[in-house]
Image: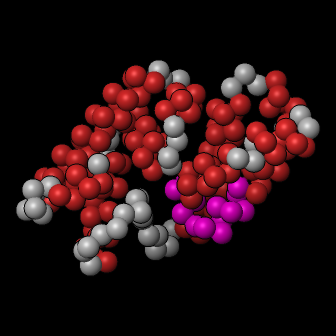
Amino acid sequence: MTTEEFKNTVIPFSRKLYPMLFRILKNEEETRDALQDLMVKLWDKRNDLVRCNNQTAYIITMAKNHSFDLLKKKRPSRIGENEEHKILNLASEDSGLEAKEKFEHVRSAIEALPEKYREVIRLRDIDGFEFDEISEMTGYEVPYIRVILSRARQKVKEEVEKKYDYDQSGKFARQIL
């Protein structure tokens, strides 16, 4: 793989990988460093990448593994650290505290989903991957991914509406889903 081919095929993935890495690492500086390290690793493995049948899945798997490795290395230092969970970038009319509570409830509803539902909703709604890319990553067919995503959204919506049914007939749930 030439430098030009690498720039055209691999570097554009950085925009899609950043949200996924940030969700795992929860630190902007670490995420940027991890993304840069990942690009160097991918450059070193560019010959393997050329021979790979599914480059997208290879790159995403490598990114996930790299970020999990970084988390494992620093796990003891993360204990007790105050982490802010921000799932979606939504404009909210609520006060900051109320909005944080709602986002935390959505996050916990997503965390409570079965693994395949959780993975698909994260990849599509949080990380912004296309259905074809999710299909390559998970091995599921696109119609099945749509079904999983629909069911996952419905479960999250039901959980949010249980908590906030007093909030104008689930207005918040409809806004995020």
Asked whether, in this view, residue 43 is left or right of residue 92, the answer is right
Q: Between residues 61 and 80, which one lies in front from this camera angle?
A: 61
Question: Which quarter of the figure has residue 77?
Answer: bottom right
Residue 24 at x, y percent in the picture: 54, 55
Q: Please, is residue 109 above or below residue 32 in the view?
A: above
Question: Which quarter of the figure has residue 88?
Answer: bottom left
Residue range of the region highlighted in magenta in the rendering: 23-35
Residue 111 at x, y percent in the picture: 35, 48
Residue located 26% across and 78% down the image: 95
Number of marks in picture: 0
Residue 99 at x, y percent in the picture: 29, 70
Q: Between residues 83 and 47, which one lies in front from this camera angle?
A: 47
Asked whether, in this view, residue 142 is left or right of residue 38, the answer is left
Residue 80 visible at all:
no
From this viewpoint, which residue is outermost toward the right? Answer: 2
Residue located 39% across and 23% down the image: 144
Residue located 50% across and 46% down the image: 128
Q: Please, is residue 139 above or below residue 68 in the view?
A: above
Asked whether, in this view, residue 117 is left or right of residue 174, the answer is right
Residue 91 visible at all:
yes
Q: How is the image coloured?
A: secondary structure
Residue located 43% across and 37% down the image: 120
Q: Main secondary structure of the magenta part?
A: helix
Residue 10 at x, y percent in the picture: 75, 42
Question: Which quarter of the figure has residue 19?
Answer: bottom right
Confirm whether the magenta stretch covers residue 7: no
Please state, as top left, top right, bottom left or bottom right, where the N terminus lies in the image: top right
